[in-house]
Amino acid sequence: MNNLRFLKSFFILFMLLFTLNNHAYADCQPNIRIENFWIVQPPDIARSTAGYGVIKNTGNAADTLLKVSSNAGSVMMHKTEVKSGIAKMIHLSGKVIEAGSELVFKPMSYHLMFSDLAESVYHQGEKVTLIFEFEQSGIIKVEVPVRASWE
Ligand SMILES: [Cu+2]
């Protein structure tokens, strides 16, 4: 008899935990928004260029940016850091974007670094595709302009 009661309460506890866990999962999601990205139109002789913009996570769980790719060329995530007056670019293999935070790509900070450039990036007003890959949110594609300077 005791055994049966034990099993019953165990079962109830299990169901309760399962429900709570499901509930928590439903309420706990990242919400990624990609805003204002653009690529710097390089001079004709340049073999690389940079891309800037903002990734916002308005959700209540963190997400990780795993990779960026593009038809504009090869893409790497970099961060410029200044140490003893010397600027150095650090390669990032991924970046966590905490809930309610944003990751800003701008000069002398995080930036997208393009090399093996496609012809299109040499022309102001062209559009290129950026493909962002997130651990939780999956793949997000955006069309971004090529511009000569900050607007
Ligand atoms: Cu760089």
Image (cartoon, rainbow, N blue to C red):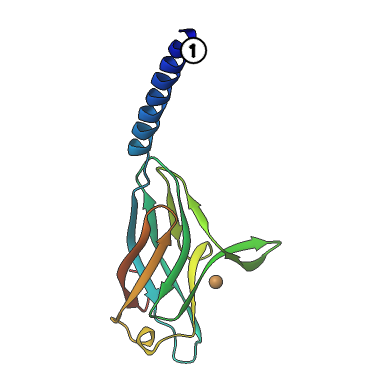
Report the amino acid beneath label 1. Answer: Asn
How packed is label 1: few (under 14 Cα within 10 Å), some, or many (20 or more)? Answer: few
Quadrant location of the C terminus in the rendered image = bottom left
Q: Nearer the viewer, residue 150 or 26?
A: 26
Q: Residue 68: percent from the left, percent from the top? A: 44, 68
The residue furthest front is 1
> Along the line of sight, which residue is nearer the eye, 43 or 31?
31
Q: Residue at x 38, y 87 (%)?
A: 122
Where the N terminus falls, by quadrant? top left
Looking at this view, is 134 or 125 the one in front? 134
* Residue drawn at 48 percent across, 8 percent down: 2
Q: Which residue is mark 1?
A: 3
Q: Residue furthest top?
A: 1
Residue ID at (40%, 32%): 21
The quarter of the picture where residue 120 lies is bottom left
Q: Position of residue 40 (x, y in %)?
A: 41, 76
Quick one: which residue is furthest to the bottom in this view?
A: 45
Q: Secondary structure at mark 1?
A: helix
Residue 15 in the image, given as x and y percentages of width and height = 38, 25
Compared to residue 12, the image places residue 82 above or below, namely: below
Residue 142 appears at what percent x and percent y? 31, 68
Answer above or below: position of 32 versus 38: above
Q: Is residue 66 left or right of residue 27?
A: right
Left or right relative to 124: residue 44: right
Of 52 and 59, which appears nearest the observer?
59
Q: Ligand 1, what quadrant? A: bottom right
With respect to residue 63, does 76 lie above or below? below
Where, by quadrant of the figure, is residue 29 drawn?
top left
